[in-house]
Amino acid sequence: MIAEPEASDLLSVARTLRSHRVYLFYKHAAHFCNPLVPVEWKALQDDPVLVDEQVRRVVLELLPEQLPSLEAGIYSPVPIARGLAEGRSLGSLLADFRYEMIQVDEDQRWTWQGRPVATKVRAFLLENLAYEPALELYYFEYKVNADWWDKSYLETATTPLTARTLGLVESGARVDLDNLRSDLLVLETFRLDDRERLYCETAEHGEVMLSDSVRFSLLSTVNEACDALQVGEAWYPLRWPE
């Protein structure tokens, strides 16, 4: 395992970069790994790129030197280091090995590089969408070939996921999401926004928006004080916008 001082300084810089909406991906086997995600950082521990002098120079010196003007996005330090060794300019490499994140606005509209994401592309990415609790970010990851799983994060003004249906189960309530997965609601976390859209945390997908049909059904049970709603036989708090 790599000595802690050599590993921890890379992790420290990754934390600093995150505060500027900059993330680092290291390709490990067929997947991209972010050192800020504990399970991915563990996978990287024995990867020689973490002690490569050129890669370390990119992460510890060159990228921080670009702050605060470094564009937000996901950067790949290894190909940047290789490009520098070949004599390419840092500016061109930052442009080539930066992945701009998809933006999701308050109305759940998806854009990338300022343009709407096509309906078919959005549907495909939704099917491969998951939530990373360590970063509180949604991401998509899908297999391109045996050696490459593509991956990126979403920057979201609201959750990109909608719960289409709700059903009662022994452990509470389970919803079917539009990423073709189901999840349990954390029933103590219902909230309305200033447009009276209803949200709830889930066990594995962060917060999700409840579809109109589910919302109307739940809000029809609200008590007289409008601070609780009923799911099955139990009552749960309902938080209004402050």
Image (cartoon, rainbow, N blue to C red):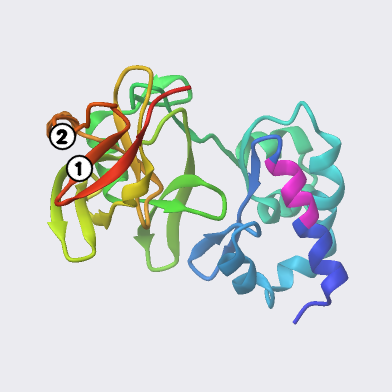
The local crowd at label 2, few if under 14, some if 14 to 19, many if 20 or more residues have their Cα within 10 Å, is: some
Where residue 183 sits, quadrant-wise, is: bottom left
Which residue: 73% across, 31% down? Answer: 70
The kind of residue tagged 1 is Gln
Compared across the picture, whether 63 is left or right of 118 comes to right
User: Is 186 colored magenta in this rendering?
Assistant: no
> Which region is colored magenta?
12-18
146 up-or-down from 100: above or below: below
Q: State the image coordinates of residue 141 (x, y, percent, origin top left).
A: 40, 54
The secondary structure type at the circle numbered 1 is strand
- In this view of the protein, which residue sits in the foreground, 204 or 3? 204
Q: Which mark is residue 196?
A: none
Residue matched to label 1: 230
- Nearer the N terminus, badge 2 or badge 1? 2
| Residue 58 seen from this side | yes
The kind of residue tagged 2 is Thr
In space, the residues marked 2 and 1 are separated at their CA atoms by 6 Å
Kindly check if marks 2 and 1 are in contact, taking CB atoms under 8 A apart as contact.
yes
Q: Which mark is residue 221?
A: 2
Q: State the image coordinates of residue 202 (x, y, percent, origin top left).
A: 34, 51
| Residue 55 seen from this side | no
Q: Quadrant of the N terminus?
A: bottom right
Which residue: 41% across, 30% down? Answer: 158
Compared across the picture, whether 105 is left or right of 197 comes to right
Q: State the image coordinates of residue 135 (x, y, percent, origin top left).
A: 56, 49
- In this view of the protein, which residue sits in the foreground, 8 or 101? 8
The local crowd at label 1, few if under 14, some if 14 to 19, many if 20 or more residues have their Cα within 10 Å, is: some
User: Is 13 colored magenta in this rendering?
Assistant: yes
Which residue: 84% across, 43% down? Answer: 62
The secondary structure type at the circle numbered 2 is loop
